[in-house]
Amino acid sequence: MSAVVNGVIHLALAEDIGTGDITTELCVPKERRARGIFLAREELVLAGTGVLAEIFSQRGGVDSLEFHLRDGESARPGEPIATVAGSARTLLECERVALNFLQRLSGVATLARQYADRVAGTSCRILDTRKTTPGLRDLEKQAAAAGGVTNHRRGLYDAILIKNNHIAAAGGVTEALSAARKSGLPIEIEVRTEAELHDALNAGAGHLLLDNLTPEQAREWIQLIGGRATVELSGNINLSTVRAYAETGADFVSSGAITHSARAVDISFRLSLL
């Protein structure tokens, strides 16, 4: 776990437990030991096992934590995901935070797998985006990768993506590309019109982002490009349309929905005394 992720977990525990779990402290003897089982309650792709381990590590009082599945593996309804044993108070204090992370991250992985499955058999790969929950980007991108999609850039610092507002501010496609090349970083540029497309190709662009095209338009533009650049498609692409976009000849299709619209999956926690 990175320092950022550890900090997020610490914040989540502090947010929920605060000055103490009053219900547990009043109802459960301090010395009581228990076992808890995390169970899938629907079909899902698991993600977040590392977070679960860090939650219990930060809180202490746990004797053992056993994972029955690894990140990226599928679970059926009723299938155990992990078993934890130790202080009953610790297990109860951590229950909600653990479930919040597991359900959210497994939801991202499950949706990512659905996107990846939709384009199986094509040469196109699915990319995630920066449309993540603030503070959870590393975790959500790990979950997306567990689901079978490819991580795109992690932030504004590790690759260059010239979008329409950058082009406007720079004075044009050629000007933006010329300035960006000074960095030595990978460069991708968004083009919205055929004129911008030709400008980008004439300027030697090697990676193009085609946004908000229909599959038919995308196929026509990709034929115009003729292999001179790598092509990514984006813009309102969903599970029902992603296959059509993948079959246009694009190298990549990106979808923000994988992280910003993933539904938390149903996972339960069942406790029994030792």
Image (spheres, rainbow, N blue to C red):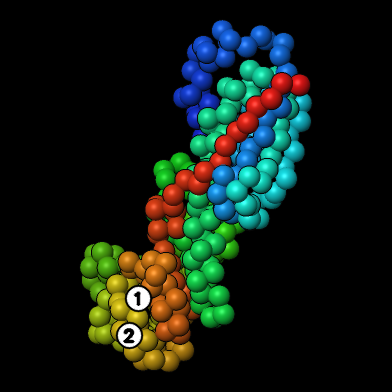
At 57% from the left and 80% from the top, the residue drawn is 121
Where's residue 95, x and y in %? 57, 29
When the figure is inspected, residue 226 is found, relative to residue 264, above or below; the finding is: below
Residue for point 30% across, 77% down: 213
Quadrant of the snapshot with the N terminus = top right
Work out whether 102 lies above or below 97. below
Q: Secondary structure at mark 1?
A: strand
Locate residue 185, reporting x and y percent. Answer: 49, 66
Task: Using the image, tell me which numbered label, if any, was put on residue 262.
Answer: none
- Asked if residue 183 lies left or right of residue 85, the reply is left
Q: Is residue 44 above or below residue 176?
A: above
Q: Amino acid at mark 2?
A: Glu
The residue at which mark 2 appears reads as 216
Nearest the viewer among 199 and 190 is: 190
Q: Earlier in the sequence, mark 1 or mark 2?
A: 1
Q: Amino acid at mark 1?
A: Leu
Q: Are marks 1 and 2 in contact (CB under 8 Å)?
A: no
The C terminus is located in which quarter?
Answer: top right
